[in-house]
């Protein structure tokens, strides 16, 4: 019904990264297509960014926050184990106690997962849900590891879903399979717990990724998602007007377009400006495509994402 996005003001260019790690703008552009990414300010986090994107989504949907029945926020970078960031968004929207709000974690496929869950919760009863993807990857990146820190960025995207005269979510699926080639381990109380081996110096807990392995997984996940959605929705490649693929790497988007046999112009691309914003990447790209007037009434838009877990999934939306 309506979408919104929030990107922090601070832009981190490849040129600036050249001052921090042994890399070059040319290397990053050639391997990833990323030119710059956004970094959240110290006072910002997944909830503040999620709330900003949500306000825009509610305004574009033309509904008040108190009409929502659910707020579902997908993230991989919560600063708190609890409370859920979704409840902090609920508070920021001034609707405490009026609906259920919870977080959901599914790697960079989080928005697809949240959309899948929300649709099944609201559709039978004609209710409304706010679905958010928000991540501060910069807080979990190892800024000494040139093979990962160049890839990620911060941001949030949101969408309101509910009964609408125009458009619908036609088909969707989500899937997972354990893959430890991409993970981020959290810190816990090893210093004080009597039940764990004592450890004064905690390990570094940053994003770990085997880039080439994840690259292969990502390309396969895009192909498999496309094949499966075409099968369950009984549509052909030619029926698709736009592909919104998780913005991890330009080469993955390019491979997706070639496999789908759709012109690259039909693949929404903003990875050059924001890098990989994890759960936020699909709703940010969707919002931008709508604001730029690319997606029009009746268009068939395919949202595909893949991520740590491993997780993958797709949703076919008729706008
Ligand atoms: N600058 C310069 N050189 C670098 C950099 C850098 N930033 N990073 C790595 N290198 C070097 C390596 O050290 C290596 O050097 P060596 O040959 O001397 O050992 C060389 O470049 C090649 O390294 P590879 O890792 O093999 O490079 P590759 O071509 O695979 O590109 C990349 C690396 C960009 C990370 C690629 O593997 C990739 O895109 N993987 C997928 C990443 C991704 O999209 N992840 C997220 C998807 S899932 C999700 O979103 C959760």
Image (spheres, rainbow, N blue to C red):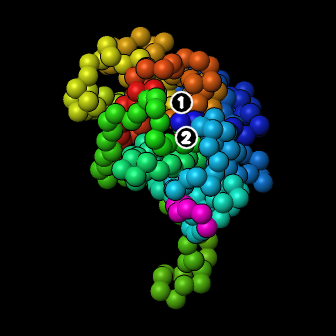
Evaluate whether residue 277 shows in this view. Answer: no
| Residue displayed at 47% across by 36% down | 164
**Alpha carbon separation for disc pair 1 and 2:** 9 Å
Residue sitting nearer the eye, 84 or 33? 84
Quadrant of the drawing holding the C terminus: top left
Q: Which is in the foreground here, disc 1 or disc 2?
A: 2
29 over 228 or under it: above or below: above
Is residue 199 in the magenta section?
Answer: no
Name the residue tied to disc 1: 286
| Residue displayed at 48% across by 43% down | 162
Is residue 101 in the magenta section?
Answer: yes
Residue sitting nearer the eye, 116 or 28? 116
Taking 242 as reference, is 281 left or right?
Answer: right
User: Residue 191: percent from the left, percent from the top?
Assistant: 60, 80
| Residue displayed at 51% across by 56% down | 70
User: Residue 311: percent from the left, percent from the top?
Assistant: 36, 46
- Picture mark count: 2
181 over 287 or under it: above or below: below
- Residues tagged 1 and 2 counted as in contact (Cβ below 8 A): yes
Q: Which residues are magenta?
A: 97-102
User: Residue 280: percent from the left, percent from the top?
Assistant: 56, 41
User: Residue 107: percent from the left, percent from the top?
Assistant: 46, 48
SS of the residue at dot 2?
strand
Name the residue tied to disc 2: 159
């Amino acid at each position: 019904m309506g979408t919104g996005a929030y990107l922090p003001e601070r832009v981190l260019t490849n040129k600036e990264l050249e001052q921090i790690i042994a890399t070059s703008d040319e290397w990053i552009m050639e391997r990833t297509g990323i030119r710059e990414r956004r970094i959240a300010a110290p006072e910002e986090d997944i909830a503040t960014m999620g709330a900003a994107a949500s306000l825009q989504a509610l305004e574009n949907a033309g509904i008040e926050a108190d009409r929502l029945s659910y707020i579902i926020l997908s993230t991989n970078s919560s600063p708190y184990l609890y409370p859920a960031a979704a409840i902090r968004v609920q508070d920021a929207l001034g609707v405490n106690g009026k609906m259920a709000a919870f977080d959901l974690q599914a790697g960079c496929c989080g928005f697809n997962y949240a959309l899948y869950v929300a649709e099944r919760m609201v559709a039978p009863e004609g209710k409304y849900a706010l679905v958010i993807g928000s991540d501060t990857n910069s807080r979990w990146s190892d800024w000494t590891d040139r093979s990962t820190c160049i890839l990620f960025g911060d941001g949030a995207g949101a969408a309101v879903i509910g009964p609408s005269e125009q458009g619908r979510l036609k088909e969707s699926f989500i899937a997972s399979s354990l893959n430890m080639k991409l993970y981020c381990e959290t810190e816990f109380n090893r210093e004080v717990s009597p039940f764990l081996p004592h450890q004064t110096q905690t390990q570094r807990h940053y994003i770990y990724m085997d880039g080439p392995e994840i690259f292969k997984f990502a390309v396969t996940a895009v192909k498999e998602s496309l094949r499966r959605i075409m099968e369950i929705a009984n549509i052909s490649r030619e029926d698709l007007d736009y592909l919104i693929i998780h913005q991890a790497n330009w080469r993955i988007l390019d491979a997706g377009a070639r496999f789908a046999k759709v012109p690259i112009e039909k693949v929404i691309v903003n990875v050059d400006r924001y890098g990989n914003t994890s759960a936020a990447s699909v709703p940010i790209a969707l919002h931008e495509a709508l604001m730029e007037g690319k997606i029009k009434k009746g268009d068939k838009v395919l949202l595909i994402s893949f991520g740590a877990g491993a997780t993958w999934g797709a949703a076919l939306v008729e706008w």
